[in-house]
Amino acid sequence: MKKIIALIGFSIIMFSCDIAQQVLGTYQLTQCKYDYNSISGLTLSGINLQNTNSLSTLNPLNLATLTSAFSSKNGSLPLDFTLNLDVTNPGIQPALLNGLEYVLEIDNHEMTTGSLQQKLQINGGQKAILPIKMSFDLKKALSGESLESIKNLAFNLAGIGNASCNVTIRLKPNLMIGNQLVPCPSYIPVSFKLSNAK
């Protein structure tokens, strides 16, 4: 009986230590510095705009596809890309990510919300890249806006427009307690400006 009690006590202590480590690691994640790194794999209506410097460099078929997608009032305009963030841990304690929820805003318009199921550990004094894949219908996200406004935002985000765009992504890391993921109570806002560069 004593051995069983000791084993139970040891298990409780180990479980408590694991929870404490997770809490500290998630807290350290909120203390990290977040910076824009890049946007990769950007496609609009299936057209790859990642290495496009201007609309004039698109081949006629791709340009016709985009023109048709923009001019159609009822059609969709799928936008896909991966947002890469630099995450720097300035402390000593490792920062632990067990997935997160996010909200993406561009020029004060909420574009999409989603979740990322990915684990990441950033040791003290180290930096890592956090890739977040986005996929949403730009026309649906900007419902009520003019087609011209939608086109301008899409091209500005791709770095081939005539103006910059302001991007904010709000991150809510998950805390792992046992086998359950529990969202943190508040978001971490990360804001940056894109201007003719990906």
Image (cartoon, rainbow, N blue to C red):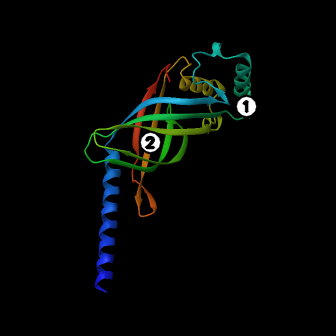
Instruction: Note whether 11 is above or below 120 in the view shown.
Output: below
SS type, badge 1: loop
Q: List the residue tagged with mark 2.
A: 170
Q: Extreme left residue here?
A: 92
Judged left or right of residue 20, residue 60 is right
Instruction: Note whether 121 is above or below 139 in the view shown.
Output: below
Judged left or right of residue 117, residue 49 is right
Q: Which of 10 and 56 is in front in this view?
A: 10
Q: Which residue is drawn at 63% across and 23% down?
A: 148
Of the 4 image quadrants, the one containing the N terminus is bottom left
x, y percent for residue 167: 47, 32
SS type, badge 2: strand
x, y percent for residue 48: 63, 26
Q: What residue type is labelled 2?
A: Arg
Q: Residue at x 61, y 39 (%)?
A: 136
Residue 19 quadrant: bottom left
Q: Which of 138 and 15 is in front in this view?
A: 15
Q: Residue at x 64, y 29 (%)?
A: 44
x, y percent for residue 104: 50, 39
Instruction: Note whether 118 is above or below 67 in the view shown.
Output: below
Mark-to-mark CA distance, 2 and 1: 30 Å
Q: Which residue is drawn at 33% across and 51% down?
A: 25
x, y percent for residue 60: 73, 16
Q: How crowded is mark 2: few (under 14 residues within 10 Å), some or many (20 or more)?
A: some
Q: Which amino acid does label 1 sit on?
A: Lys
Q: Nearer the viewer, residue 185 or 23?
A: 23
Give the mark nearest the N terminus, 2 or 1.
1
Mark 2 or mark 1: which is in front?
2
Q: List the residue tagged with mark 1.
A: 73
